[in-house]
Amino acid sequence: MKRKQSHGVRRIIAALAIAPLLAAPAAAAGKGRPTRSQAKAEREATRQLNLQAANEAQQRNAAAHPAPAASDAAAHAPDNTPPAAAPTAPVQVQPSPRP
């Protein structure tokens, strides 16, 4: 034989069932859209982290892949010097046949 629950027990059970639903909006209240200053600060922090990561990656790459030794004679020449002429055979121009 089942015993009838009193009204007080029913109210407690109902309150316990509803409590998480009422607490959810309060817990999510701080997770709304950030203000402009918060967004700006977050963008700046992200920019700083990206710069730091890029610098670290550049250093790791430089250490892992050192620059090869120069094999070109003009590699140590200043930037404003003309390129060295390549040794070639003289070029002979032949006139193209006309129709």
Image: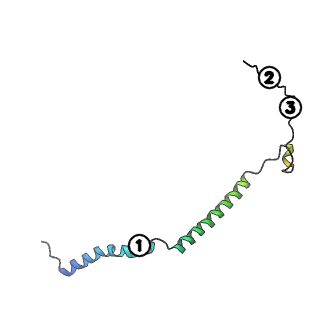
Q: How many marks?
A: 3
Residue 95: assigned label = 2
Residue at image mark 3? 88
Mark 3 or mark 1, earlier in chain: 1
Q: Quadrant of the C terminus?
A: top right
Q: Nearer the viewer, mark 3 or mark 1?
A: 3
Picture coordinates of residue 79 (x, y %)?
83, 50
Observer-nearest residue: 25 or 37? 37
Mark 1 or mark 2, earlier in chain: 1
Residue at the image point whose x is 17% and y is 77% from the top: 5
Say which element carries label 3: loop
Q: Nearer the viewer, mark 1 or mark 2?
A: 2
Horizontal relation, residue 34 to residue 22: left or right = right
Say which element carries label 2: loop
Picture coordinates of residue 47 (x, y %)?
61, 65
Q: Marks 1 and 2: CB-CB under 8 Å? A: no
Residue at image mark 1? 28
